Image: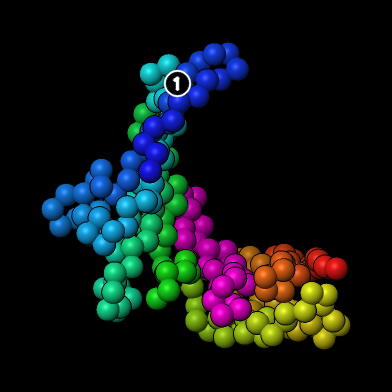
Amino acid sequence: MITEKQTFTSDNKELIESYKYPNDFANNNNVYRDMVDSHILSPVVEKIVEKDNLVIDKKKIDFTNRRAELGLDHDLFRPSNVSTYNIESEVLEEKVSYDKYDSQGKLLQYTSNDGITKAIYWGYNNNYPIAQIANASYNSNIQSKCEPLNLITERNLTTDNKSSIKNVFDEISQIVPQNTSIQLLTYCPLVGITSKTNERGITSYYEYR
């Protein structure tokens, strides 16, 4: 694993990027010790960028073990929040918190530092995100409303497919607060995105040959 990288800018200033991993933060009984003991060594926990010996950028990812929260019989280490460096105050500031995961480790809900919470709904055997709703917490009832999207797998969507997408959007719109923003996605698995529906209910379609 790389621990340091040196480059030079166009004005011949040296940039040094340094990387730290779970082993660098492992103490007795903390989450990073558990990660190391589980041979999870490669996630970058902290990245620091220096220019002429001055820190110009820094990013820290905190991890937690979601095992107890999800009632699992195995460890599940996932990021809990991300902080970035404020050059003026010279301190780390939290930019996003990862609030909820499913038992497979898929992210279901996160909150950015502006206070906006976004929920993510997965489909196609939990492989692709099919809906994202801003200003709303994760709701399993909405997951069930998204189920028809899983049946849309064609490269080029039919009239029935397009009607189904509209129905899903309309049904979700009826059960979420008015200030929420809904986005939907459909896919042809292993090929690509076949449609994107924005918060106004306007859908763009993508065709493949």
Q: Is residue 148 shown above or below 78?
A: below
Q: Position of residue 148 (x, y in %)?
A: 67, 85
On whether residue 86 falls in the magenta region, the answer is no
Which quadrant of the figure contains the C terminus? bottom right
Q: Name the residue under label 1.
A: 51
Q: Which secondary structure type mostly characterizes the magenta part of the structure?
A: strand
Q: Where is residue 53 in the image (x, y as percent from the top left)?
A: 38, 18
Which of 98/207 is in front?
207
Q: Is residue 200 shown above or below 45?
A: below
Q: Residue at x 76, y 70 (%)?
A: 194
Tag 1: amino acid: Lys
Q: Is residue 12 shown above or below 173?
A: above
Q: Position of residue 139 (x, y in %)?
A: 50, 78
State left or right for residue 186 relative to residue 97.
right
Residue 74's image quarter?
Answer: bottom left
* Disc 1, SS: strand
Q: Where is residue 161 in the image (x, y as percent from the top left)?
A: 79, 82
Near mark 1 (Cα within 10 A), the count class, few <14, some 14-19 or many ≥20, is some
